[in-house]
Amino acid sequence: MPLFGNKKKRDSRSVPNLPRLDFGLTVATALLFAYTLIFLRHDGIALTEFAIALVATVFVFRGCKAFFTALGRVIGTREALERPRNLRKFADQGWQLAIHVVMTVVEWQIFANENWRTWDDTAAMWRGTARAPPPLLRRMYIAQLAVWFYTAFSHKFIEAKHKDYFVMYGHVAVS
């Protein structure tokens, strides 16, 4: 029985059994999460924003998965839909697409608000570092952090283990 809910997909038989590596990656992720909470506790607003971003990430993740699953059923071919794995992978990649598009739009807005100064003159990024970052940039980093932690949590406890489980979990844990 999975740790969270009963919807966990059957793990791939091709995933090697490496409990020490799995435990090490889980501990690394948990330590990074604890460090983040300790770091953010000094700024109550940032901690609140982080908590809100985590909750929002869960809802957005679920909404995107539902949307892309429905979209896959509409645009998928009969042959592709015969294998449930195809629809699941389509929804997983759709979630990634949605997150990357939204973050790109936010980054574009940040550059536009700064008159593209840091785009053309990279040294401008380091001038005046004593001033607080723009609020939109700060919120984008907090949202990215929430997405990162939810992705790690989901990869470990919710999603089925695929052949590339350790590669992807390592990618999430150390990036």
Image (spheres, rainbow, N blue to C red):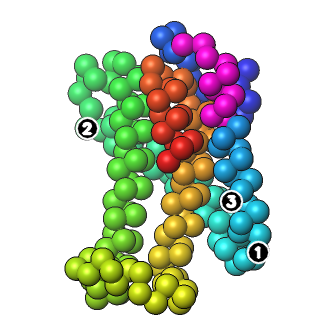
Secondary structure of the residue carrying numbered label 2: helix
Q: Which residue is mark 2?
A: 75
Start-end of magenta stretch? 16-26
Q: Nearer the viewer, residue 12 or 25?
A: 25
Q: Which residue is mark 1?
A: 42
Left or right of 114? Residue 61 is right
Decide whether the magenta segment is chiefly helix, strand or loop: helix
Q: Quadrant of residue 19?
A: top right
Give the alpha-carbon distance from disc 1 to disc 3, as whole Å. 11 Å
Q: Is residue 74 above or below residue 18?
A: below
* Comes first in the chain, label 3 or label 2: 3
Q: Nearer the viewer, residue 126 or 94?
A: 126
| Amino acid at circle 3 | Thr
Secondary structure of the residue carrying numbered label 1: loop
Residue 5 seen by the camera = no
Residue 7, image x, y percentages: 62, 28
Q: Which mark is residue 137?
A: none
Cβ–Cβ under 8 Å for marks 2 and 1 = no
Residue 136 seen by the camera = yes
| Amino acid at circle 2 | Ile
Q: Quadrant of residue 160?
A: top right
Q: Work out which quarter of the rendered image holds the N terminus and state it.
A: top right
Q: Which residue is mark 3?
A: 36
Residue drawn at (52%, 27%) of the image: 166
Residue 3, image x, y percentages: 74, 30
* Comes first in the chain, label 1 or label 3: 3
**Looking at this rendering, what residue extends furthest in the top direction?**
13
